[in-house]
Image: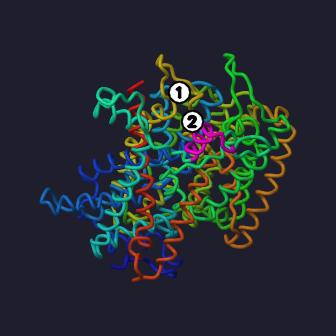
Amino acid sequence: MAILQLNDEQVRTWTRAQKDAWWFENVYRGTVPQLTLRSALTGFLLGGLLAATALYIGGKTGVTIGVGLSSVILSFALYRLLHGAGLGRDFTILENNCTQSIATAAGYMTSPLISSLAAYMLVTGRIVPWWQMAAWLVVVAVIGVLVAFPLKRRFINDEQLPFPEGRASGVVLDALYTGSAQAGMFKARLLAVTAALAGAYQFLVSDGWMRLLQFPILRLDRWAGVTSPWTLHERLDTYYYDAAARLGLWIPRIRGISLQQLGLRLTLDTAMLGVGGLMGVRVATSCLLGAFVNYAVLAPIMIARGDIVARVAGDGAAIPISRVEIVNQWALWWGVAMMVVGSLVSLLGRPEVVASAWRALRGGASRGATDPLRSIELPLTVSFVGIPALSVVGAWAAHDFFGVPWFLAFVSLPLIFVLTVICTNSMALTSWTPTGALSKITQFTMGAIDRANPASNLIPAGMTAEIAANAANLLSDIKPGYMLGAKPRQQAIGHVVGILSGVVFCVPLFYLLFLPPDAAGRRSTATIVSDQFAMPGALQWKGVAELIAKGVSHLPTSAVAAMAVAAAAAAVIEILGIVTRGRFPLSAVSIGLGVVLPPEYTFAMWVGAVFLGGMRRRHAAPGAPGHETWHEGYEPICAGLITGSALVGIGNAIINVLAA
C-alpha cells in the first residue's frame, strides 16, 4: 500500500498547522499499539545485542554501522514465528517501528566509545571509571533527544525533508505489513543463515571457544594428550610463514623489510566482508588505496630514513617496528590530515546544507497558530527546561570527571544548536552526518583557548559532536514513525529506553574488549589499540588533540611534508567529487581511514564490496535467478556476516577474560 504523503505544492504552500491537521486526520494511527511492554523489551534486548556488534566493528574499523534494518527484520520474523506457533499475537507495524527506534538509539551509543572517550584515555593514560562513562553517555544522548524533538516540528512536520535512510526504513516496514509477509521472512532467514555461517567460521578461528570446546567439554587433554587448542588461522599467510620457517622458503620483502612486519597480512574476516558490502566499492577502494600507499610505499621509505624506528619502552622492553608503530610514529599525521581536510571540504561543498541550516536558524513556527498535535507531541517545555538543565549537568561532568575548565565546559555549549542544525540538514538531504568535520570545529576552537590540556578540546568536542549527531540520527529514525502514523511522545520515550540499552550493553563490553585485565587484574590504556582493534576513530581524535597541544614541531620533517601533501590532495579529491556530482571514484576521508586501519582489513572490505556489490548488480533485474537473494537480500547478507562474526568474537573475548 502506498504511504500517504503531501505533494510538493502542498509542502510549499500549506502552513505547518495545516500539514499537522492533515497528518492527524489521514496518517496518525492513534488506536494501534506502539510502545508496549513487549516492544520495549524486544527493542532493549535486540538493540543491546546489535549495539554490541556495532561496538565490536567500530573498534576494528572506525565505521559506525546502522542497526535499524536488522532490527526491523529480526523483530518482524520473531513475532511472526511466535504468532504462527500460537505463543502470542503478531507485532503491529507501530510496535515494530518502536522496536526499531529503541534498537537504533542503542546503536548510536557506541560512537563516543570508539572516538572521543577512547582518545581521551589514550592521550591522558587515565582509565575512566565505568560509572562516569555511563553517566556522561546518558547525559549527552538525552540532550540529543531533547534537541531533536523541537527540530522534528521544523524539519519533518513543516519542511517534510526526505531523510532518505529513514524513509527507506518506513518503506520496508510498510512493505512487510501491507505486502507479502513471505518476503520479510525470506530476508530474516537469509540474515540468520548468513550469520550462522559467519559465526561458525569465527568459532573455528577463536582461541577461547576452541579451548573451551577441546578441554573442559571434549577433555582432549586427558585422553588424547592435547596440550594446546587447535584453531584455524584467521591470518591465512601464517600457514606460509610457518612453512617458510621450516623449509627455508622465500620471505617477501619491500626494501628489505618483511611484509609481515609492515602489517601487510592476508586475513579472512567475514565481518569485514559484510562491512565492505555496506561501504560500497568507492569507499572500500579508497581505503585500500590509502593502505597500499602508506604500508607498501611510504612506510618502507620512512623506515629506511630512520623516521620510523624500533624503540625501547619505559620498562626497558624492546618494541620492534610493527603496524602500530608505523601508525603512531609517522603515518597517523598524514592520515588525519587527509580525513580532516576531506571532511571539511566535503561539508563546505554542500551549500544547500549550510543554506538550509541558516534558514532554520532564522525561521520558526507560525506565531499564533493552533497546534493540532499538541496532545501527542513531546511538549516543547520539556526541551526548553531539560536542555539547559542537562547542559549544566554535562558541563559539571566534563569538569569533574575529565578535568575540563568550567569556562571551556560552558563556552562550548552554544555550539550545540548550530552544529545540530547543520548536521540535521545534512542527514535530511543526504543521509550523511558530517560528525568528523563538526567535531574538529569545536576541537580546534577549544584548543585555541587552552592548548595545554587535551581534555579541554577532546571532551567538549565529543559532547557537541555527539549531541549533534545523535539528534540528527534520531530525526532520521523519527521519519519512518511519522510516515506510518506513530505517536511522537512514545517515540521519545522509546529513544530513552534505547539509550539505557546501549549503555547497559556497551559500557561493560568496552572494558572487556579494549581494557582487558592482565594476570594481576590491572588494566592499561595501552590495550585500547591492538592488532585486533585498530581504533582508527580514536586515533584520529588523539592525533588532532596532540597536534593542538604540541604543534608540528615535534614531528619529523617528512611527516609535516606528508601532512601538507595529504591536505592538498584531500581538497583536490573532494572538489573533484563535488564537480562530478559524486562520480569521482575516490573519497579523501576513506583514503585517510585506510592509513590507520590494518591493511588486511582494508583488503577484506574491498573483496566484500567488489564481490557482494558485483553479485547485487549481476542479479538486479526483477525476476532474474538470484534476484531475491543477491539484490533484495543484499543488506540482510551484509548484516548477517557482521552480526554472526561479531557475536561469536565477543563471546570469545568473554571466555578469554574469564579464563585469565
- Please state the horizontal and vertical placement of residue 63, each as a whole percent of the image: 56, 51
Which numbered disc, 2 or 1, marks the residue that appears first in the sequence? 2
| Image-quadrant location for residue 276 | bottom right
Q: Secondary structure at mark 2?
A: helix
* Vertical side of 173 occupied by 300: above or below: above
Classify the position of the C terminus by image quarter: top left
Q: Residue at x 39, y 49 (%)?
A: 199
Q: Nearer the viewer, residue 250 or 353?
A: 250
The type of residue carrying mark 1 is Val
- Please state the horizontal and vertical placement of residue 520, each as a whole percent of the image: 48, 16
Q: Which mark is residue 128?
A: 1
Q: Nearer the viewer, residue 344 or 531?
A: 531
Answer whether labels 2 and 1 touch (C-beta < 8 Å): yes
Mark 1, Cα crowd under 10 Å, few <14 / some 14-19 / many 20+, is: some
- Please state the horizontal and vertical placement of residue 463, each as a whole percent of the image: 57, 40
Whole-angstrom CA distance, mark 2 to mark 1, is 8 Å
The stretch in magenta equals 237-251
The type of residue carrying mark 2 is Leu
Mark 2, Cα crowd under 10 Å, few <14 / some 14-19 / many 20+, is: many
